Image (cartoon, grey):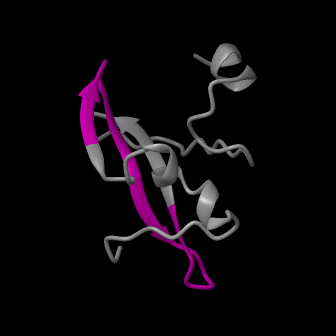
Amino acid sequence: MSGKFEYRFRKPIDAPASRGAQAPRYRRSVEHGMVIEHDVAVALRDGTEILIDVFRPDDVRPAAPLIGWSPYGKHVLGYLAKAYP
């Protein structure tokens, strides 16, 4: 990632930084036997980069991927956060 993440569909005045939010940055932690990686840059086929969160076991066992997607962002504190804490 180039260090500056561009928001494609937001007006500049609506950018999170204009409201005091911090820029996305990679973070890694180990909790409850899981490795959790936040804001991992992934390139799509068209070259667009998106930021994803990865949750995986903290061992070498194979694990099936679970993919969650929402048009409202990955950290929305609404229904999804209540339904799947």
Residue at x 75% of width, y 49% of height? 71
Specify the quadrant of the image occupied by residue 44.
Answer: bottom right
The picture places residue 34, in percent across and down from the top left corner, at 33, 29
Asked whether, in this view, residue 74 is left or right of residue 56, the answer is: right
Can residue 59 be spotted in the picture? no
Q: Taking 31 as reference, is 66 above or below it? A: below
User: Which of these two is toward me, 5 or 31?
Assistant: 5
Residue at x 61% of width, y 82% of height? 45
Q: Taking 46 as reference, is 18 above or below it? A: above
Residue at x 43% of width, y 45% of height? 54
Farthest-out residue, bottom: 46
Asked whether, in this view, residue 29 is left or right of residue 57, the answer is: left
- Which region of the structure is painted magenta? 28-50
**Overall secondary structure of the magenta section:** strand
The picture places residue 85, in percent across and down from the top left corner, at 57, 16
The picture places residue 4, in percent across and down from the top left corner, at 38, 71
Residue at x 63% of width, y 21% of height? 81
36 part of magenta stretch: yes
79 part of magenta stretch: no
Can residue 49 be spotted in the picture? yes
Specify the quadrant of the image occupied by residue 67.
Answer: top right
Q: Taking 50 as reference, is 72 above or below it? A: above
Asked whether, in this view, residue 38 is left or right of residue 70, the answer is: left
Q: Quadrant of the N terminus?
A: bottom left
